[in-house]
Image (spheres, grey):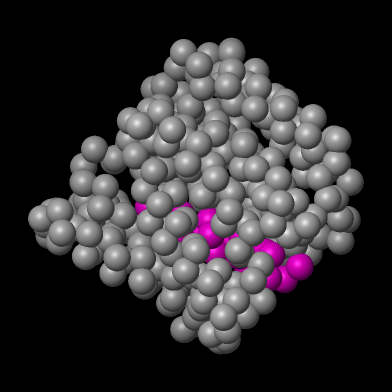
Amino acid sequence: MTRIFPFIFILLWSSAFITTKPIIDNSDPFAALAFRFFFVAIGFYLFSIYLKQSIIVKQKNLIESVFSGVLFHGFYLGGVFYSISIGMPTGIAALIVTLQPILTNALSGPILSEKVTIKQWVGVLLGFIGATLVLGLDVGTNIPLLGLIATIVALIAITTSTIWQKKLSNNLPLSVSNFYQALGGCLFHTLIIIFFAEPYINFSQTFIIAMSHQIFLVSFGAFTILMYLIKNNSASKTVSIFFLIPATSAFMAWLFLNESLTNLDLIGFLITTIGVYIATQD
């Protein structure tokens, strides 16, 4: 069963890109994320109670998990949502974030003492080339500076969060750790709303459907699988599957949103798949 977790994760995580635009079309990004992680935190709290896992933890573990949530749910998702909300092309934002495995491979050696082989580096580079082809070498040129900065911040945040989570992943049960991470993300976006943003949410049918998708399938489903994979695999191998996200998102956009999918996209998808396969083999 666990062998199919990466494939389930890819499908669920990729689908988040399809529902992000409808959400920010009906709300400001930080209010939407605060709303999302308020309910995600409640969900993981109830799940912890169901599993009879105590949420009373050591202060050190609490701070570590909340900080991980601030990085992942706060800076990473906040950066991506904000950049798209101010006009950053989704494809370019996804491509920048897709640099994560390269940064993780570079840092997992000295920080986690993981051995990153030449074969893995070849796979990572092939994955990046394939992702670039899928997203297009000539995607829009009108990139807002703040959007670019926000996306780079998101890239740094998700890389740091992945390595951080790997270092502390054995300290708490997944449901308890996810509860505190969601709580950290909710608090982060609430503070952004209080001091910097003008929150609004239009609870249209489109918003409710898109938000429900991101709460249940992405936050409860994909994120839990990601934490499981980080806990049970090396950080560098786990994040290599992220190179399949842009290609899968492009295919979903073609299937559900009637967006074009060219021969170059298909070639890129193939190269990416080969790269991920190489990067994740022992």
Q: Nearer the viewer, residue 202 or 195?
A: 202
Q: Position of residue 7 (x, y in %)?
A: 50, 36
Q: Residue at x 40, y 52 (%)?
A: 221
* In the image, residue 73 lies in the stretch drawn in magenta: yes
Q: Residue at x 36, y 65 (%)?
A: 40
- Count of numbered circles on the image: 0
Q: Position of residue 68 (x, y in %)?
A: 37, 52
Which contiguous range is marked in magenta? 68-87
Judged left or right of residue 131, residue 209 is left
Judged left or right of residue 172, residue 234 is right
* In the image, residue 180 lies in the stretch drawn in magenta: no
Q: Is residue 96 visible?
A: no
Q: Residue at x 58, y 84 (%)?
A: 204
Judged left or right of residue 3, residue 107 is right
Q: Position of residue 193 (x, y in %)?
A: 49, 80
Q: Nearer the viewer, residue 20 or 204?
A: 204
Identify whether 212 is placed above or below 106: below
Q: In which image quadrant can residue 267 be found?
A: top right
Which quarter of the image is occupied by the N terminus? top left
Identify whether 167 is placed above or below 173: above
Q: Is residue 255 visible?
A: yes
Q: Nearer the viewer, residue 226 or 56?
A: 226
Q: Residue at x 81, y 60 (%)?
A: 143
Q: Position of residue 107 (x, y in %)?
A: 50, 31
